[in-house]
Amino acid sequence: MLQGFRKVALKAGESRSVHFTVTPAMLRFYNQQMQLVTEPGEVEVMIGLDSARVNRARFTLQ
């Protein structure tokens, strides 16, 4: 799910570092009992122009 989206405008050839924080609240979802929960486990984050061109990172939510 797209979370914390912010468009960053760049000129041709320009690059910029972007930093953001992923909070547990951003990782909530509804379980089978329709309760909003956050579960521990491995999370994969994908950042890129589209689904074919992404950078991936993983972390563990405890």
Image (spheres, rainbow, N blue to C red):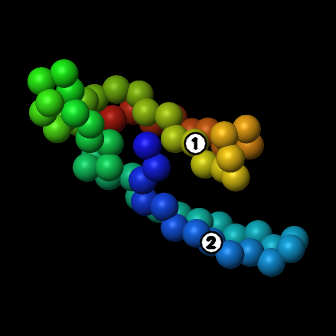
- Residue, x 20% and y 27% (percent of image)? 31
Residue 14 spot, x, y in % from top left? 81, 73
20 and 50: which is toward the camera: 50
Residue 23 spot, x, y in % from top left? 32, 52
54 and 33: which is toward the camera: 33
Residue 16 spot, x, y in % from top left? 70, 70
Check the image and report above or below for 36 versus 14.
Answer: above
- Check disc 2 and report its element: helix, strand or loop: loop
Give the label on residue 23, or none: none
Which quarter of the figure has residue 51? top right
Q: Amino acid at mark 1?
A: Met
- Residue, x 70% and y 52% (percent of image)? 49
Q: Amino acid at mark 2?
A: Val
Give the label on residue 46, or none: 1
Say whether residue 61 is left or right of residue 4: left
- Residue, x 74% and y 75% (percent of image)? 10
> Label 2 belongs to which residue?
8
Which quarter of the figure has residue 53? top right
Q: Residue furthest right?
A: 13
Looking at the rendered image, the quarter that the C terminus falls into is top left
Q: Residues within 10 Å of mark 2 (few under 14, many from 20)?
A: few
Q: Residue furthest top?
A: 32
